[in-house]
Structures are given as C-alpha cells and as structure tokens.
Image: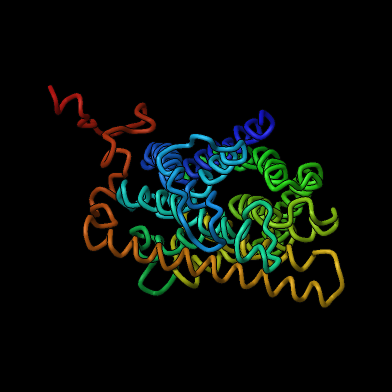
Amino acid sequence: METIVLFGAGLLLLRVGQVLYAVGLSRSKNSAAAAVRGVADLCVAVLAFWAVGAAILLQDRNGIFSIETGLLFGWSGMTPQAYFYAALVTVATGAAAGTVAERSKFFPPLATSALIAGVLVPVAGKWAWDGWLSRLGFYDVGGASVIHLTAGVCAAVGAVMVGARNGKYNRDGSANMIPGHNLPLASVGALVVFVAWLPYLAGCGLVHGMLTHAVEGPMNVLLSAAAGGAAAIALGQMRYGKPDVGLTLAGLLGGLVAISAAGGGVGTISAVVIGAVAGIVVPLAAVSLDLLAHVDDPTSAISIHAVGGVWGTLAAGLFSPGSFAERFKSVGVQALGAVVIAALAAAFSVALFASLGATVGLRVKEADEYDGLDLAEHDIGAYPDFQQTMIKSYHLREA
C-alpha cells in the first residue's frame, strides 16, 4: 500500500508541471488567472472523483456502466489502487482549462473538470481496464486514451465553442502569434511533467498487476520523451531554419502521452519510434489546428493529449508482440477503443458547453479580455511592480 500511495503522490507532480506550463504560456495579464485555475481544477477533480467517479470506476457489476452506491461520497473501504486512481484521474482535467485560457469565464472550465473526473474518465477507465473493451483485448496501461484522449477531446470542444482570443485571427484567414510571457517557466513546467511521468507509468504498472511495466516503463518514458523532443527540434530546424521552443515542448510532452498506452510492454527501440513519431505529428497537428482549422489553443493541449493519445493507443497495438495478423487485429481493437472513448467525451462535452453557453455564458466581456483576467476576475496583477494602473481590489470595495 505504501508504495502505491507514494507513486500516487509522485503522480500529482504532474499537476505542478501543468500549472507552470500553462502559466508560462499565458500573457502576463492572465498568468495569475492561469495559476488559480490550475488550483481550482485540482480541487474540483478530487471532489468529483470522491463523490461520483470512484463509484463508477470501481464498481464490479458489469463492464459498461453502473454505480457502486456504497462508494458514493466516500472512500470507506477503498483499496490502495483506488487512491492511486484518484491521483491518476486528477491529472486529466488541466488540458481543457489551458485550451480556453485568456478568454473564458472562470467557472465553465471547472464544470468540465467535474465532468472529466466524475464521469468520463471513470466510465472510459472501466471500459478499458476492466470492462468490455478490456475483454476484447484493448490495451492501455497508462491511460493514453482513457486519460489523455478524453481530456484532449473535451479541450477541443471547449476551444471551438468558446472561440478564439480577440486578435488571434485576421479577416484574410491569417493567424497572429500570441506568445506566452515566460517561456522559461513553461519549459520548467514541461520538465516537471517529464519527471512526474516516471512514477506515473510505474504506478500504473503496479496497479494493473504488471510488474514488467513498473520496472521497464520508466526507461521507456525517458526514451520516448527524449525521442519526441529531439524529433520536434529536427522538425523546427527543417521547417523554420531554427529549433522552435513551443514545438519542442509539445514534442516532448507528446512523446510522454504516446508511450502511456504501451508502457513497459514494448522494447526500447519501439519506445524510441513511438516517441519520435509523436514528436513529429503532435507539433504538426498544433500548427495545423492553429493555421488551417483556426482553433485557438495557447498550450497546444489538444494536439498533445488528443493526437498524442490516439497515436499512443494505436502504437500499443502496432508494436505489440505476436504475428502480423495478431498485430493487425490488435490495432483494430485499439482503433475501436479510441473511437468510442473519443465519441463519449465529445458527446458529453458538447452537451455541457452548449448548456453552459445558453445559461451562464462561456466568454468574458471584450473589455475584460483586453484588460486581462487577472484584473477582471481576480482584482490582482501577477506582477504588481510593473502594473501601469491602480487595481480596484476587494479591499477598497469593502472599505
């Protein structure tokens, strides 16, 4: 029990890295808002899994959907694996918040956090790890589909329905670059995520009773991430004549997501190939979503989680041991799993964002977006020493 709880604590470092990454890629006038949203996401995700998600994921009545009423609103009698799953589920929700940063209201992304941690990941996890997909031979040790594809799809729906930041796209169809205010901070965040992925994947192997994954998974994490980062650097050099910082970070993180499905179940050469492919397709997807599809994603979370998750899910079947026919069948099962999990996430997230848009609204006022969410929503500036105007804080309001 102590080992699994320790891995769960290490896994939560992913949250620290996600927050640093999102803050660094936000403009300075939105950086405090990005930080507090990361904290709020974590709080909501933990409570949602405690209240409902655990009762869905840990039920043993059937492999599709049911609720263990004895686990609603309480973890009494839970196993150590349940505590690890609780930590695992909480990392899934940061993608949606980062994608709609700088223009969405504070509470709609939190509703998405509750949906992901309370319903979507538990249902998909039941299907993939102990349900009907698992019985078909579906293979996803670390949640490339369950965790990351789910979060990436929700992020994509949110980005489309909230809309792009003002000034991001021009009438002629061109796109403007809106750089984050602190790329070194974003880089540190990506490296923290890199470090946290080691206990993440090792813990997943222990929880699923796969000691090989617990031992060999961390090595594959290192190799896949390194290959993803190196491939993204090469892509930037070939395409732009110099390594691109944002695409390099996206390639590194994409390599981490992609290896999550296979874990330690593939050899080191396969891990390098999986990471290298992710280091190419994830940055290319990020650029295409921005320039061609006009989907505004400041953190490239859609590409990292959704595209990286799909590739990792398919790669787990493509590089599985066995004959060509067995691998072909495995890829088919993996594709089926990715499609149904993506469809589940898309259906629920569209319904959620549509209902929120029709009631409380999704976007802040144009003037508030111009001033920045730090001031508009939190009456504070992340860097008050450089603030040009006085902030009407709640202290003055209550005086």
Q: Residue at x 14, y 28 (%)?
A: 397
Q: Residue at x 68, y 61 (%)?
A: 312
Specify the quadrant of the image occupied by residue 70: top left
In the depicted view, which residue is nearer to us: 187 or 35?
Answer: 35
Does residue 146 appear anywhere in the picture?
yes
Give residue 69's position: percent from left, percent from top: 43, 47
Number of disc labels:
0
In the depicted view, which residue is nearer to us: 146 or 36?
Answer: 146
Say if 6 sits above or below 127 in the image.
Answer: above
Q: Residue furthest top?
A: 399
Give residue 166's position: percent from left, percent from top: 33, 59
Image quadrant for the N terminus? top right
Image quadrant for the C terminus? top left
Figure colour scheme: rainbow
Q: Residue at x 35, y 60 (%)?
A: 167
Left or right for 99, reference 107: right
Left or right for 297, reference 165: right
Give residue 263's position: percent from left, percent from top: 74, 52
Left or right for 348, reference 335: left
Say if 28 sits above or below 6 in the image.
Answer: below
Q: Residue at x 51, y 54 (%)?
A: 121
Does residue 300 appear anywhere in the picture?
no
Left or right for 360, reference 135: left
In the depicted view, which residue is nearer to us: 65 or 105?
Answer: 65
Give residue 40's position: percent from left, percent from top: 39, 39
In the depicted view, which residue is nearer to us: 391 or 157?
Answer: 157
